[in-house]
Image (cartoon, coloured by chain):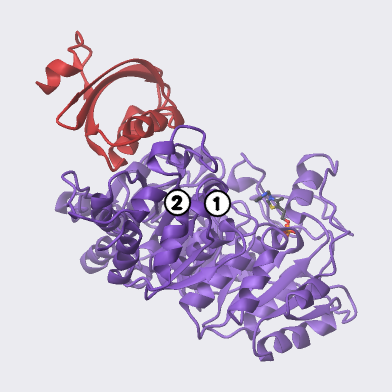
Chain colours: A red, B purple
Amino acid sequence: MSFASTLEHRLLCQFQAEKGSLERLLRVIRVRGFDVQKMELAIKDGIYHLEILVMGERCIDNLQAHVQKLVEVIGISKLPEVEPVTALERCA
Amino acid sequence: MTTGAQAITASLEKHGVTTLFGYPGGCIMPLYDALIEANLTHILCRHEQAAALAADGYARASGKLGVCVATSGPGATNLVTGVANAYMDSIPLLVISGQVPSGLIGTDAFQETDILGMTFGIVKHSYLVEEVNELPAIMEDAIRLATSGRPGPVWLDIPKDVLLQPITNSQSRSDTISEPEPNPVDAETLAQAFQLINAAQRPLIYSGGGVMAANAEQALRNLAEAGGFPQVQTLKGIGNAGSDNGLDLGMLGMHGSRAANEAISACDLLLGIGVRFDDRATGKIAQFAPQAKIIHLDADTSEFNKLKQVDCCLRGELGHTLDSLSCGLTKTRDISEWQAHCRTLKATKSFHPTPDPDEQAAIDGPEFLSLLSQIKPASAVVTCDVGQHQMWVAQYMHFGHPRQHLSSGGLGTMGFGLPAAIGAQLAKPDACIINVSGDGSFMMNMQEMATIQRYKLPVKIIILDNQRLGMVRQQQELFYGERYSEIDLSDNPEFSTVAAAFGLHALCIEARHQMRRGIETLFAYRGSMLLHVKIKENTNVWPIVKPGASNQEMIDPFAVQSTASTTIKPHHA
Ligand SMILES: Cc1ncc(C[n+]2csc(CCOP(=O)(O)OP(=O)(O)O)c2C)c(N)n1
């Protein structure tokens, strides 16, 4: 797509810790054109907190919209390019 | 005490489900046991794929939830194509499969498959139900999810022991899932849309399957009427414009009318309504609607700017959004010149069959379907299979409502037509349901003649038999240098004899002069009947846009002096 660029993106995502919800999320990332570079997952009170670095040529906003559509996803946001904070620290 | 299985039937009854389609087997047997007492009609299809496709056809024809059921392992995997079909076309489906008992999951038990893992990509949502007390709440969630927002299939995989266990303490799930209600479109975005509309000199509506999903065809027609907008549709949008609309240019895209594709190229404002800019509709996306500003209306945010950057996104329930647009439409520019241009396009560049003067000549698919379109009852529902015949139905038949034209759009599933017709007939017992199939597609689910016979469904079956996988043959002719590979079906069985073996009445015709009588006999016959129509073997679907090319590069040997079309030699056979 003409409006795309090759980039790494850091995303923070909270979603319900249901059977298969992590697979579902990773599948969307793969199918919508991104590769996982690094990820950190923590669980608290039945909610997964995932910090994930993805790389892909497509528009990251589209990926966010597709992830957001997953029924178990509570929220997804882009993180600024700063030193990573662990997912556990974030859910504290 | 209520068991898991009984909780399912009770929930279906509570939600007004009357009909489900399925096939029994080991792990789903507790549910089949509960069906004996339930106030539900179960239709035994003869293949789980057909059960899923019939549930899909039921949902398309009625606008209600379709329900299908199968056992674990092969039963569940057989459902997959039908569920993918519903997913691609956003059809509300509840899919229930049995699973091996909880303790055996993960042991490669007899008839165990990880159906949850296998189907993530073709469901709106899915559950492996582990706790029977959660089952009633999961049923609530599942039915709501399947039918709300952008509809789609929701799959429940339920271990056999969970189906058998008593419900002791029905729980509401703490994390009961709800989709955010789409906000009404905000005033600012709406104002932006009006600005674009008011500035446009050549506005055009491009509508799709989202209109049917939202039951918004009347709202769409009101907007078109209020603005005097010409329209084109996707395959799934056929019927959106209603019948006898002088500004309806028909289907766009790979096999769309030249009128529709040329209007898309010429318009300066495109109103995309319940569409997803699919490649079969847009052709090479970079050259799609090159002069136009685009307003996109949809229920699903993830469709915005997915393939094409647009100028204004209106997210929300389509009916509401369309009403807001219609009501707020102030005086638009004078677009009468553009309207006149579109009327001329319709008159000169849409689909009109050219009848062969020879009455003894072989039957031409498009001419037959034009005649069928004239003779069929106005309220008839046509289900298609996939291939040339499907495109000819889209091109040459007329539909007053999108729920009258049931076609497998996104997945393009050969074998869809017959089970979909079964579903449609059960949804609309009094309607005339016609399945137009090809000789290849028909054999993908022809065992369903047994279902038709068992339930005495008066489905009318038409096979357009070109003794070929016609659409593949056409592409091999045009794009693979006439190197034909595995498309010959000249050793087809005698379809009339096959139909007779299932107890169906059948008739075979092969010359033009038999067409009218054949069609009239089909409609006059009470009950199901198969009309085997031998058609010319090498007719192509025109126009065609080569996959990956732009819609401006339509190939159409019959184009007269069209600057937008490439002219190539027609195939005479
Ligand atoms: C299940 C499935 N397998 C393969 C295809 C690829 N395919 C698309 S059209 C077509 C030929 C269909 O032949 P037929 O049903 O006889 O229709 P015709 O094109 O001759 O009208 C094939 C094989 C498909 N769409 N679906």
Q: Residue at the far left: name it.
A: A92
Measured as percent of width and height from the top left, residue B400 is found at: 49, 77
Give the amino acid type for the residue marked by disc 2 in the picture. Answer: Gly
Badge 1: chain ID: B
Q: Nearer the viewer, residue B218 or B350?
A: B218
Binning the other alpha carbons within 10 Å of mark 2 as few (below 14), some (14 to 19) or many (20 upward) gives many
**Disc 1 + disc 2, Cβ < 8 Å:** yes
Binning the other alpha carbons within 10 Å of mark 1 as few (below 14), some (14 to 19) or many (20 upward) gives many
Secondary structure beneath label 1: helix
Seen in the picture, residue B119 relative to B381 is either above or below; the reply is: above
Q: Nearer the viewer, residue B563 or B412?
A: B412
Badge 2: chain ID: B
- Residue lying at 39% horizontally and 37% vertically, measured from the top left: B103
Seen in the picture, residue A44 relative to B183 is either above or below; the reply is: above
- Image quadrant containing the C terminus of chain B: bottom right
Give the amino acid type for the residue marked by disc 1 in the picture. Answer: Gly
Measured as percent of width and height from the top left, residue B481 is found at: 83, 40
Closer to the chain start, of discs 1 and 2, is 1
For label 1, the residue is B75
Q: Write down the quadrant of residue B10 in the picture.
A: bottom left
For label 2, the residue is B98
- Tally of numbered tags: 2
- Residue lying at 77% horizontally and 80% vertically, measured from the top left: B506
Q: Is residue B123 visible?
A: yes
Measured as percent of width and height from the top left, residue B547 is found at: 64, 42
- Using the rendered image, report if marks 1 and 2 lie on a common chain: yes
Q: Nearer the viewer, residue B452 or B69?
A: B69
- Residue lying at 36% horizontally and 70% vertically, measured from the top left: B17
In space, the residues marked 1 and 2 are separated at their CA atoms by 9 Å
